[in-house]
Image (cartoon, grey):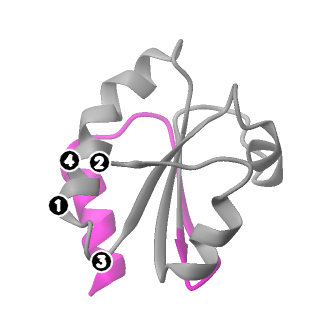
Amino acid sequence: MALAITDQNWEELVKNNEFVIMDFWAEWCGPCRAIAPFVENAAETYKERVCIGKVNIDENVNVTMKFNIKNIPTLLFIKNGELVDKHVGALREADLINKIEAFIR
C-alpha cells in the first residue's frame, strides 16, 4: 500500500530512502483516481526497493508548493535525495513499471 506523504513526513522519507516516488493527487481529480490502482500495485510490488507514497495536495500545501506542483496527477521520482524524473498527467501501468525498472537497475 502506498504511504501517505505529508508536509510533516516527506523530508524524512526522502532522506531515509534511496528511491522515492511521490504521487501528487486530489480526491476530486479523475485522472488521479484512474492511476491510483497502478500506484498501489507498484507500491506493493516494489515495497522492498522503492518508497511509493501519495501526497494529497488539498491537505499538504507546503510540500505541494515546495515542488511547484501546478497540475495533477504529477509523479516525482527522487533518487538519493535528487529529483531525477517527473511525469505530469495520467500514464499507463506499463509505463510506470518501465520508469521504476529503469531507476532500480
Mark 1 and mark 3: Cα distance apart in space:
9 Å
Could you say which disc has been placed on residue 45 in the image?
1
Could you say which disc has been placed on residue 1 in the image?
2
Q: Residue at x 26, y 87 (%)?
A: 105
**Up-down relation of residue 45 to residue 1 (above or below):** below
Mark 2 and mark 4: Cα distance apart in space:
8 Å
Mark 3 and mark 2: Cα distance apart in space:
14 Å
Residue 53 visible in the snapshot:
yes
- Neighbor class of circle 3 (other Cα within 10 Å; few <14, some 14-19, many 20+) is some
Q: Residue at x 75, y 53 (%)?
A: 67
**Amino acid at pointer 1:** Thr
Mark 1 and mark 2: Cα distance apart in space:
9 Å
| Mark with earlier residue (2, 4) | 2
**Amino acid at pointer 4:** Asn
**Up-down relation of residue 79 to residue 68 (above or below):** below
Label 2 near label 1: C-beta < 8 Å? no
| Mark with earlier residue (3, 2) | 2
**Amino acid at pointer 2:** Met
The residue segment tinted magenta is 78-105
Q: Secondary structure at mark 3?
A: loop
Residue 85 percent across, percent down from the top left: 53, 66
Q: Secondary structure at mark 4?
A: helix
In this view, the residue in front, 22 or 84, is: 22
Q: Secondary structure at mark 2?
A: loop
Label 1 near label 4: C-beta < 8 Å? yes
Taking the magenta stretch, the answer to whether it contains residue 89 is yes
Disc 4 designates what residue?
41
Looking at the rendered image, the disc whose residue lies closer to the viewer, 1 or 2, is: 2
Mark 3 and mark 4: Cα distance apart in space:
14 Å
Left or right: residue 29 compared with residue 70: left
In this view, the residue in front, 16 or 80, is: 16
